[in-house]
Amino acid sequence: VDMRTQCVILPIFGNPVPFHISTIKNVVLPDPDTATYLRINFYSAGMAVGKDAPVNMANLVQKYAPYASFIREMTFRSLDSQNLTQAFRQISELRKRARQRELREQEEANLVVQEKLVRTKNERVPRLSDLTMRPVFAGKKTQGNLEAHTNGLRFISTRGEIVDIMYANVKHAIMQPCENEIMVLIHFHLKDPIMVGKKRQRDIQFFTEVVEASQAVEAGRRSMYDPDEMDDEQRERQMRKRLNEAFKDFCKKVEIVAKRHNYTLEFDIPYRDLGFQGNPHKEMVFIQPTLNCLVNLTETPFFVVDLAHLDHVHFERVTFASKAFDMIIINKDFSKVPLAVTMIPNNDKDSIQDWLTDMEISYTEGPMNLNWKQIMQTIQDDDRFYMNTEEDEVTEKEAGWEFLRMYGKDDETDDDADGDDSEFSRADGDARESEEELDEDESAFDSEEEEESDFDADEELEEQGMDWDDMEREAAADDRRKRHRETDDDGGVDVRNRKRQSTNQSNGRNSMQRSSIKQGRGDKGGNRPSSKGNKRFGAAVPKRRR
């Protein structure tokens, strides 16, 4: 195995034949038995090349497949397992290095060349010490210092690793203080990605932890009045305040240095009051809006959405039965897959919609989850997506994102029509209620009259063509006639009283007969019926002989 020229020299009929490492698909070393075998598989026509195949090798296989002959595999056998085992390890390591180099070339292929950093030498530069950078170099925690120079910032780690961030390449700069957070941080969202280690990165962050993310819990409980615990809380509050002031002071100095050299750089602070819980990736995080972005910077991977690239927001699973809903963020570039933030509590929907209204971003809502891949494909093929007519300019259609609304325009027009007729319907309803009340009063009056008197005063009201004034006058006249009968000077009692008297007299006679029967049976101690007790009936009852 030649590591320098990246070749594997294989013996074929006693002749050494070199094969480049890019032609080898994989190497297999089966478990040794009486002898050791080493099988080398090559890329060849007639079988799947695979996504890990080098681009050049895939093109060559496709080009020469019709007429060339390929070696598919070669197997070597040896009684000495040490030589083949060492060859297996060297070939695997060489394939790994070649694969990493190819990935790095692919990552750097579309990178925008950044200008070189111009260091400030004649004056003291703004600096923050003991910072931790994310993402890290080679899987290790990266700590160091951040300095602001003439045309950019430079981070120098304790191991000598350097990351340069140019002012012209910064799209959004965000400073998040440690308010209800475990860290204070500065985040840079770049216009063009840069290489950090072996990967392209568009988001670079520098932070300092205020408290440890995980603390050891003591076996015993500590009292809230423990002096040591109170001192720890006091020191933590002082540290938070000191770190917030240090980061804010550094941001102001960086803005001054950038403005002095004709660069525009402003740091935003997230609005924590407008934040909400959601799941943009695989875990629940706290998402906060800034002046230009919607971000989550505490947890990785970072979630940064530029509001300038946001076209529409749709809320899914909005029902009374569910306790959470999903928010779909649609980019202005319809070729990109929409972002989804799931499991947002229903209590935050109104505040999110108010914020979108203030930012002049349209939104819709619906009860179902939609197939966004198919929807975006349909929208890309529609050249008149934002127009309300078809290609003939006559046939009407829903313009833009109107088709996502839970209720269409027909319902809105119906609501408007109902609103226009609301006064008349309200007046009709009041009239119906007044008529029903009047009918109830009349029925009650009629029932009383049927019980108390034979006179029916409603016969005249049954005439057709009478208006409300005439009916009121007739009712007033009937009341006057009724009162006149009750207060008649000549007639004694009216018909009603005569009926009551006759009824009471008959009841009195019956009671007298029952009492006389009792006395006849020998109840000498019984009292005689008195006429005084029946005076309340309006007439005296005559005494009966014993």
Image (cartoon, helix red, strand yellow):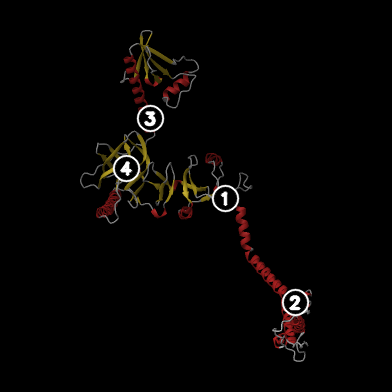
Q: Circle 2 sits on which residue?
A: 451
**Which of disc 1 and disc 3 is earlier in sequence?**
3
Which structural element holds mark 4?
A: strand
Name the residue located 36 percent from the left edge and 33 percent from the top edge.
Answer: 108
User: How much space separates mark 2 and mark 4, taking CA atoms?
Assistant: 101 Å
Residue 196: % across, % down = 33, 36
User: How much space separates mark 3 and mark 4, taking CA atoms?
Assistant: 25 Å
**Quarter occupied by residue 525:** bottom right
Q: Nearer the viewer, mark 1 or mark 2?
A: 2
Q: Circle 3 sits on which residue?
A: 103
Of residues 454 and 243, the one drawn nearer to the viewer in this rendering: 454
Name the residue located 38 percent from the left edge and 30 percent from the top edge.
Answer: 103
Pointer 1 with pointer 2, Cβ within 8 A: no
Mark 4, residues whose alpha carbon is within 10 Å: few (<14), some, or many (≥20)?
Answer: many
Which structural element holds mark 3?
A: helix
Pointer 3 with pointer 1, Cβ within 8 A: no
Residue 193: % across, % down = 37, 39
Pointer 2 with pointer 4, Cβ within 8 A: no
**Which of disc 4 and disc 2 is earlier in sequence?**
4
**Which of disc 4 and disc 1 is earlier in sequence?**
4
**Quarter occupied by residue 6:** top left
Pointer 1 with pointer 4, Cβ within 8 A: no
Q: Circle 1 sits on which residue?
A: 406
What amino acid is at disc 4?
Met
